């Protein structure tokens, strides 16, 4: 690898998550600053019309490493064109050099072929290409620093503009003063919540017949404590199916307007998704979206539920990928909420609409009647409960604590004993769902523990969830969630294997998903995650690292009961591999990369 590079060198440059790509060292753009003390070069990527700062250790001279980096399978769109561009330049420079330099000096001139590039009238200089792409300096383009994320295409400026629209907090205060009528008709909800996008506002009209209610199954008789969804009372407040479809269509519209993404072979469904280095592919720097869902999505569904908030003061600890959406819905439904998060900046949007921010977990507990928490793993839960200024220091008689994290049975049992010893009440309530379901109040909440506290949390669970289940004694919630994660994990890895095999044998992956949708495998998990795998779209809905943690805990639970879990163990290894490949903070659909590797 060369330690020094100069302007006009033809090189292979590698961005994180992408294959090495043909490019050229060019003069830096003054508006794009390098954010590292390491030696970097400013590289133009052929075929993608993008440029970025790349560290020297990720750059190799093109001719010397051509055989090493030339792809022979799964070639991304634009890669072949990029190589052709470089080869044309090399041929043109070689022809120019041989015509202008005496034959005796040919060996000395071959080391700097690029210096004669401007003599070729057929090929524009790299500066001319950039000028054609980005226009005159008199019409400045939006400035964006590409040094900390994969390269974005021309449409990125448009996406940034779209993301600023429809923040639910802009109109939250005025909305909270309104009380939605009991039993409002579906058409009325569409009139009140329709946005500027015509397809969204007309979604409910396209369905001539109302969706049929799903048949409720009776709970097993062997568990007399089993209660689901507050029984008949919840049925009258079920969110309309067309409202959920409305939210999905809005998210789909925004996804289709994002910068180009990688295209898988035989894929026909996408709208001009490319495989060149861009902001969203294939190891995705998560696309920045609004902190909360817009007024046409989560809030519209919360309004449909017509929730009467509890007079109790509510606390919430943990504003991560799931907790953020839960707090949004608690505030939108009129609850009084006090919040704390390890990263204080995540509290800002919520404090704008009435949430009270405090400095420690113990302050949350002391100022609230019921405190919820949702953090990443057992270690984080133990830290906020037993650590300095933790929850346990503020617990006293009458205080309630509800843990919504996914943790092991031993940890949840220890917390229950500690809370009860100080006169408090404890309820475990792990959730099944993803970021989208958290934002729209559609989570499945699996509770166990103090039944009176469970009933006191009625309005909170109604705001955060679509279905709530009471499972009896402490520990059953954790057991149910880990079994649920084990089944989901094996389904996801099986789906990823099937799609990878379909590509190898020449089948269209879109057609495979359509066939699955025709039969008994038709379900949201297969549809949504399958499409994400096919499109190479890994914006985080359910993080790989969190899901792999759940599967590890499920395997540990199997070890303690001498229950073999061979399929779960294999699936867990694939998620571990995806995490090791750099997909830890991407969506679980990225597990297909572990199979492709």
Image: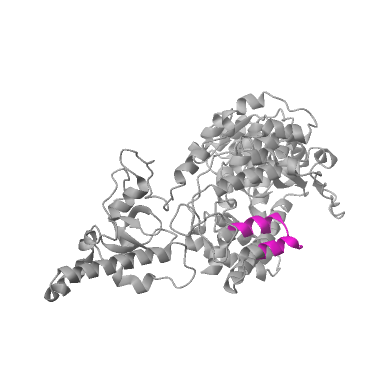
Furthest toward the bottom, the residue is 104
| Horizontal side, residue 313 vs residue 587: left or right | right
**Prevalent SS, magenta region:** helix
Residue at position x 73%, y 46% in the image: 447
Q: Nearer the viewer, residue 425 or 511?
A: 511
Residue at position x 53%, y 63% in the image: 578
| Horizontal side, residue 100 vs residue 372: left or right | left
Answer yes or no: is residue 458 visible. Answer: yes
Q: Quadrant of residue 510?
A: bottom right
Furthest toward the front, the residue is 121
Q: Which color scheme does this rendered protein use? A: one colour
| Horizontal side, residue 298 vs residue 260: left or right | right
Residue at position x 62%, y 38% in the image: 197
Give x and y (percent) for residue 158.
Answer: 48, 42
Q: Which residues are magenta?
A: 512-532
Answer yes or no: is residue 395 visible. Answer: no
Give x and y (percent) for residue 516.
Answer: 71, 63
Please check the rendered image and state whether residue 451 is part of the magenta-colored stretch, yes or no: no
Please check the rendered image and state whether residue 521 is part of the magenta-colored stretch, yes or no: yes
In which quadrant of the rendered image does the N terminus lie? Answer: bottom left
Q: Quadrant of residue 97?
A: bottom left
Residue at position x 50%, y 55% in the image: 261
């Amino acid at each position: 690898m060369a330690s020094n590079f100069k302007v006009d060198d033809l090189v292979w440059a590698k961005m994180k998550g992408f294959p090495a790509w043909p490019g050229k060292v060019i003069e830096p753009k003054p508006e794009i600053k390098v954010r590292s003390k390491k030696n970097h070069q400013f590289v133009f990527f052929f075929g993608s019309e993008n440029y970025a700062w790349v560290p020297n250790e990720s750059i190799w001279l093109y001719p010397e490493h051509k055989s090493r980096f030339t792809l022979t399978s799964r070639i991304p769109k634009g890669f072949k064109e990029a190589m052709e561009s470089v080869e044309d330049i090399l041929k043109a420079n070689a022809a120019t050099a041989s015509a202008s330099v005496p034959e005796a000096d040919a060996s000395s001139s071959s080391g700097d072929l690029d210096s004669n590039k401007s003599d070729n009238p057929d090929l524009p200089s790299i500066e001319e290409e950039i000028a054609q792409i980005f226009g005159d300096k008199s019409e400045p383009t939006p400035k964006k620093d590409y040094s900390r994320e994969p390269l974005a295409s021309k449409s990125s400026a448009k996406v940034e503009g779209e993301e600023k629209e429809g923040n639910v907090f802009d109109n939250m205060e005025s909305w909270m003063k309104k009380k939605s009528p009991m039993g409002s008709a579906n058409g009325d909800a569409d009139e009140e919540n329709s946005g500027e996008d015509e397809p969204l506002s007309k979604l409910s009209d396209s369905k001539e017949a109302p969706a049929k209610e799903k048949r409720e199954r009776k709970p097993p008789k062997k568990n007399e404590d089993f209660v689901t969804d507050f029984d008949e009372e919840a049925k009258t407040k079920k969110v309309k199916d067309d409202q959920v479809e409305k939210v999905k269509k809005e998210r789909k519209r925004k996804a289709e307007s994002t910068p180009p993404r990688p295209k898988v072979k035989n894929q026909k469904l996408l709208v001009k998704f490319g495989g060149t280095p861009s902001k969203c592919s294939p190891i995705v720097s998560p696309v920045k979206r609004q902190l909360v869902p817009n007024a046409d999505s989560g809030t519209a569904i919360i309004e449909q539920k017509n929730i009467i908030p509890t007079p109790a003061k509510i606390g919430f600890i943990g504003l991560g990928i799931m907790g953020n959406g839960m707090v949004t819905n608690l505030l939108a439904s009129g609850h009084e909420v006090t919040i704390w998060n390890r990263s204080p900046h995540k509290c800002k949007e919520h404090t704008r609409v009435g949430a009270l921010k405090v400095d420690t977990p113990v302050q949350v507990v002391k100022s609230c009647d019921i405190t919820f928490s949702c953090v990443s793993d057992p270690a984080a839960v133990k830290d906020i409960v037993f650590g300095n200024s933790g929850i346990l220091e503020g617990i006293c008689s009458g205080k309630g604590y509800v843990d919504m994290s996914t943790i092991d049975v031993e940890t949840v049992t220890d917390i229950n004993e500690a809370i009860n010893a100080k006169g408090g009440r404890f309820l475990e309530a792990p959730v099944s769902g993803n970021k989208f379901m958290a934002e729209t109040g559609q989570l499945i909440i699996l509770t166990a523990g103090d039944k009176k506290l469970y009933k006191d949390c009625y309005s909170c669970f109604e705001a955060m969830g679509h279905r709530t289940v009471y499972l009896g004694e402490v520990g059953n919630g954790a057991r149910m969630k880990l079994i649920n994660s084990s089944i989901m994990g094996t389904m996801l890895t099986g789906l990823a294997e099937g799609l990878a095999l379909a590509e190898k044998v020449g089948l269209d992956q879109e057609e495979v998903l359509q066939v699955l949708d025709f039969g008994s495998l038709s379900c949201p998990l297969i549809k949504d995650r399958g499409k994400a795998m096919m499109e190479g779209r890994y914006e985080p809905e359910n993080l790989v690292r969190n899901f792999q943690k759940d599967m590890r805990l499920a395997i540990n639970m199997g070890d303690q009961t001498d229950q073999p879990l061979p399929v779960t163990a294999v699936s867990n290894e694939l998620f571990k591999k995806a995490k090791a490949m750099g997909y830890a903070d991407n969506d679980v659909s990225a597990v297909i990369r572990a199979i492709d590797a």
